[in-house]
Amino acid sequence: MPYQLKGRNVLVTGGSKGLGAVICKKFAEEGCNVAINYSADSEAADKLAEELKGYGSKVFTVKADAGSMKDCARCVQETIKEFGGLDILIGTVAWDCDCTEHTS
């Protein structure tokens, strides 16, 4: 493989649950440092962070609302400060809703 992921710095928005959590885990397995963004559930983010630290990478959580440009900028800045740079940004945030409410 010509491109090595080991040691790369990754920020995953919506990274504490669902697809975002799976993506965080895959990057950690490859040896990446992972910033887990969450908007409300710090417990899920912290639990995932503890699990990912077992891969030997740096991991931290950052609370930010991906719907806010100010929060997005702060999230990126905190990741750069924590890791010394940012190589990969994955956006996986989604809005949770009961879609049956919105159908006719």
Image: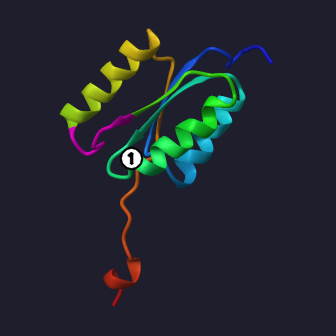
Find residue 22 and report its horizontal and vertical position in percent: 62, 46
Magenta span has 78? no
Find residue 85 and report its horizontal and vertical position in percent: 44, 11
Find residue 26 and report its horizontal and vertical position in percent: 67, 37
Q: Nearer the viewer, residue 104 or 47?
A: 47
Find residue 40 and report its horizontal and vertical position in percent: 32, 51
Classify mark 1: residues with Cα within 10 Å, few (<14), some (14-19) or many (20+): some
Instruction: Write down the region rendered in magenta.
Output: 62-68
Q: Nearer the viewer, residue 70 or 53?
A: 53
Magenta span has 64? yes
Extreme residue in the right direction: 1
Can you see residue 12? yes
Can you see residue 15? no
Secondary structure that dominates the magenta span: loop
> Compared to 89, does 101 lie above or below?
below
Q: Is residue 94 left or right of residue 52?
A: left
Question: Circle 1 — which element?
Answer: helix
Residue under the image location 51 percent in, 52 percent down: 17
Q: Nearer the viewer, residue 27 or 90?
A: 27
**What residue type is disc 1 on?**
Ser
Residue under the image location 53 percent in, 37 percent down: 49
Q: Where, quadrant-wise, is the C terminus in this rendering? A: bottom left
Residue under the image location 67 percent in, 19 percent down: 5
> Compared to 80, does 89 lie above or below?
below
Residue under the image location 54 percent in, 55 percent down: 18
Q: Where, quadrant-wise, is the N terminus in this rendering? A: top right
Q: Which residue is mark 1?
A: 42
